[in-house]
């Protein structure tokens, strides 16, 4: 019996062209799921690559081998000029994220011999901005937000506890939403964060203040909310199910801008930024902050050192001529003084 002749490289390549680029995206996402990528990561890749596929289809590029490097560069220019629904441009980080996802997708296509060469291999990514955290709270502002909540109601006490935990631990919104009852070890003063970003587990310390609020919430509020149903989540809705991420965003944003009346953007993540900055201001080591926040790279944590400026303020007060003269006069009126009226209204500074 004659053994069948295996298909040659050209036949094998042509046989794979019955799937469109959009269909290959589906196969790729299934592959990522099988490789134990988190549902959030798979969803992010989908949202970043599918707009590119649509852009290609609008130009008659249905199949991956039709796409060349100049066309990828044309798409990058499209992203640079793209305007969101609010009229604002797509952030550089968003442009980098989409281009990076496309490079990963095409690398996978090359490994599967769907394409003969990778047109994205030499694609240069936009230079990312060296941006600081969007906003951080001072310690007084943080307490202002926390103390603005009405803890006489079950929902108010639950929300206060959520924000106390966010501030104390610096965990992400997704990580808080996924916390289960058994993840809190009050005896050791720690919290187990399971399957955080990158599907990594870690243990983070919880301060005694946050633990006290947790104890009150678990004793007085959670039993009321789980009479009919108990999902096992640490923080639950009035009906006993786990809180959604958009719900956490809404309650944090409402507490900041409506209840505390602090005119700063942000929601859950601002407590993470603030916690890291405030701890650095108070002398914490960057490596310790890295471990608490779950950053893979130290460089990610070091960005907070540019916001934590208490040491710089002390040096400025000690060495700047105007401030130094003020100290030397010991109570005498210095030559360089504040404007009449002592303080300037923040509203005046905005104009």
Image (cartoon, rainbow, N blue to C red):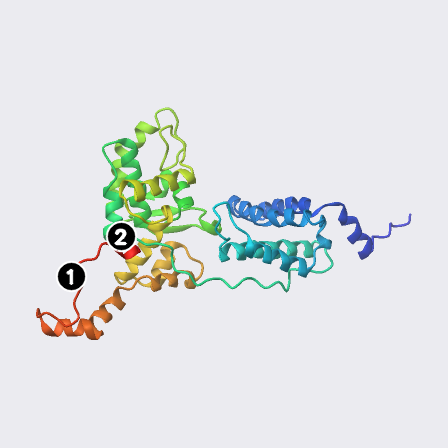
Count of numbered badges drawn on the protein:
2
Disc with the residue nearer the chain's start (1 vs 2):
1
State left or right for residue 339 relative to residue 280: left
Circle number at residue 179:
none
Circle number at residue 347:
2
Circle number at residue 340:
1
* Along the viewing direction, whichever of 118 and 267 lies nearer the viewer: 267
The percent coordinates of residue 307 (x first, y second) are 33, 61
Dot 1, crowdedness within 10 Å: few (<14), some or many (≥20)? few
The answer to whether one can see residue 304 in this image is: yes
The percent coordinates of residue 97 (x first, y second) are 53, 55
The percent coordinates of residue 223 (x first, y second) are 31, 29
Q: Identify the residue at image location x=71%, y=60%.
A: 117
* Along the viewing direction, whichever of 52 and 154 lies nearer the viewer: 52
Residue 106 versus residue 227 in the image, above or below: below
Can you say which quadrant of the picture contains the C terminus? bottom left
Dot 2, crowdedness within 10 Å: few (<14), some or many (≥20)? few
* Label 1 with label 2: CB-CB less than 8 Å: no
Quadrant hosting residue 68: bottom right
* Along the viewing direction, whichever of 258 and 125 lies nearer the viewer: 258
SS type, badge 1: loop
Could you tell me how far apart the alpha carbons at marks 1 and 2 are, in whole angstroms? 17 Å
Q: Identify the residue at image location x=37%, y=51%.
A: 203
SS type, badge 2: helix
Q: Outermost residue toward the top?
A: 228
The percent coordinates of residue 52 (x first, y second) are 62, 50
Q: Identify the residue at image location x=38%, y=59%.
A: 290
């Amino acid at each position: 019996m004659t053994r069948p002749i295996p298909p040659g490289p050209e036949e094998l390549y042509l046989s794979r062209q019955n799937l469109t680029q959009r269909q290959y995206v589906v196969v790729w996402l299934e592959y990522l799921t099988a490789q134990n990528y988190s549902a959030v990561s798979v969803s992010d890749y989908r949202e970043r690559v599918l707009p590119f596929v649509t852009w290609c289809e609008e130009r008659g590029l249905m199949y991956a081998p039709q796409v060349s490097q100049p066309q990828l560069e044309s798409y990058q220019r499209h992203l640079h000029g793209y305007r969101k629904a609010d009229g604002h441009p797509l952030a550089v980080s968003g442009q980098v994220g989409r281009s990076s996802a496309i490079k990963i997708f095409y690398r996978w296509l090359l490994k599967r011999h769907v394409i003969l060469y990778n047109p994205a291999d030499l694609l240069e990514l936009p230079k990312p901005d060296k941006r600081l955290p969007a906003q951080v709270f001072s310690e007084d502002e943080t307490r202002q937000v926390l103390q603005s909540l009405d803890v006489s109601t079950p929902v108010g006490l639950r929300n206060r506890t959520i924000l106390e935990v966010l501030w104390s631990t610096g965990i992400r919104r997704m990580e808080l939403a996924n916390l289960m009852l058994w993840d809190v070890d009050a005896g050791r003063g720690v919290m187990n964060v399971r399957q955080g970003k990158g599907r990594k587990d870690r243990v983070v310390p919880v301060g005694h203040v946050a633990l006290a609020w947790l104890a009150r919430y678990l004793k007085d509020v959670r039993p009321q909310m789980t009479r009919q149903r108990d999902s096992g989540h640490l923080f639950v809705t009035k009906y006993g199910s786990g809180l959604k991420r958009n719900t956490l965003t809404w309650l944090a944003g409402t507490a900041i801008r409506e209840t505390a009346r602090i005119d700063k953007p942000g929601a859950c993540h601002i407590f993470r930024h603030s916690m890291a900055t405030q701890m650095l201001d108070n002398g914490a080591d960057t490596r310790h902050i890295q471990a608490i926040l779950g950053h893979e790279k130290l460089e990610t944590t070091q960005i907070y050192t540019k916001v934590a400026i208490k040491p710089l303020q002390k040096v400025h007060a000690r060495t700047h001529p105007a401030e130094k003269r003020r100290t030397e006069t010991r109570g005498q009126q210095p030559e360089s003084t504040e404007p009449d009226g002592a303080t300037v209204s923040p509203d005046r500074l905005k104009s």
